[in-house]
Amino acid sequence: MILNKNSIRPKATIIVNPASRSGLKVYRQLSNCIDRYFKHEVFFTKNRGHAIELAHSSVSDVIIVCGGDGTTNYAGGMKVSPHSDPLSNRARMLLLKWMKKIIFLMLFPRVYSGTHVNVRYVEDMDARRIDILTPGLPVDVEGEYVGITPCTFMISDEYIRFV
């Protein structure tokens, strides 16, 4: 989208999960520049499912959602990817190396402090593109089955448009 000072700014609905640390961080960054590009209204979610209601009732040209503590913290406060930054242009990839089940069980509690990434069985790295070439493995993204390998995951420099 290219806008100049003579452009008519599209209307945006911004939905923020105030319980999400990363959602608030994204919103604070966004709020510094959003006026240049959009006429907008901001809504803060109040409970589970509220964001869906807000999105369905929106009559805006664009819906922007700021949320997702799952980027760095999961249910129960697990810090699965403690070095993730939702504002960076990189994804974090955690690779678990083979280990005996007893070692996994002994190391798992470290996920709550985020120190599991410092052990020799875990590799934590930046990535802009991840290619999984082994055929026939199930692919699960954020708890949803999305297909089988081979597959590629990439960070895009373009906006994601949901229809």
Image: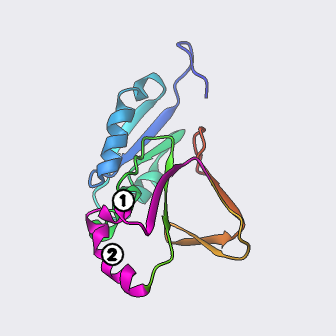
| Residue under label 1 | 50
Q: Which residues are magenta?
A: 101-129
Screen quadrant of the N terminus: top right
Residue 38 x %, y %: 47, 29
Is residue 22 placed above or below 61 in the rendered structure?
A: below
**Is residue 42 something one can see in this rendering?**
no
**Is residue 24 something one can see in this rendering?**
yes
**Three-letter code, disc 1:** His
Q: Is residue 6 magenta?
A: no
Residue at 40% x, 26% y is 33
- Farthest residue to the top: give it: 6
Residue at 35% x, 82% y is 105
Residue at 48% x, 53% y is 125
**Three-letter code, disc 2:** Leu
| Residue under label 2 | 107
The quadrant where residue 32 appears: top left
Q: Nearer the viewer, mark 2 or mark 1?
A: 2
